[in-house]
Structure formats: structure tokens, C-alpha cells
Amino acid sequence: MFVYFFLILFLQTYFYKPPFLFILFLVYNVILKYIYYYYKYVLICIIVSKNIYCIDKQISKL
């Protein structure tokens, strides 16, 4: 993450442009984090629900 950060800062200073790249990087970072947490949550839900389903099957066998 920090490598990208410094690379963008370097490009910005090198080309003397407004911080569009930096803003883009921040937005991209936030979106990535959001997607990551969302999918993690969904995965946990799927795993938990599968486990519950398995437990239900085990109970019904007894």
C-alpha cells in the first residue's frame, strides 16, 4: 500500500499536476476496503449458515 502511495506522490510532484492521482488513490483504497470487508462478512455468513445446516442435519439423524 505504501509503495503505491509514494509512487503516486512521486508522479504527482514529477508532473506538477493537481492531486487527481492522490484523490483517485484514496477513493480506490476506500472502495477496496469496503469491498474486502463486505465480502469477508458475506463469507463468514455463508460459512456459519453452512455449519448450522450441517448441525441441523446431524440433529435430524439422531
Image (cartoon, rainbow, N blue to C red):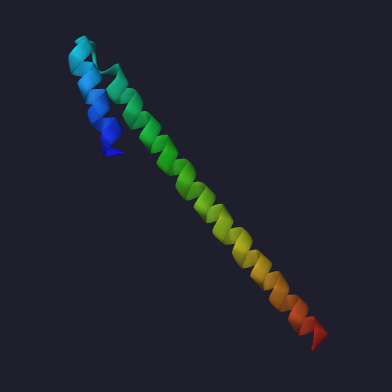
Q: Residue furthest bottom?
A: 62
Q: Tell me which residue sits at (35%, 24%) in the image.
A: 24
Q: Is residue 50 above or below residue 2?
A: below
As drawn, 42 above or below 59: above
Question: Quadrant of the image for the C terminus?
Answer: bottom right
Image coordinates for residue 48, horizontal then vertical, percent: 60, 66
The quadrant of the picture occupied by the N terminus is top left
Where residue 26 sits, quadrant-wise, is top left
Above/below status of 2 relative to 22: below
What residue do we see at 19% from left, 10% from top? 16
For the point 24% across and 18% down, which residue is it? 11
Residue 49 x, y percent position in the rendering: 65, 65
**x then y, percent, for residue 29:** 37, 35
Q: Is residue 2 above or below residue 15?
A: below
Which residue is at a point 26% across and 31% down the rendered structure image?
5
In terms of depth relative to the viewer, which is nearer, 10 or 58?
A: 10
Left or right relative to 54: residue 16: left
Q: Position of residue 55 (x, y in %)?
A: 70, 77
Can you name the residue that lies furthest to the top here? 16
Outermost residue, right side: 61
Number of numbered discs on residues: 0
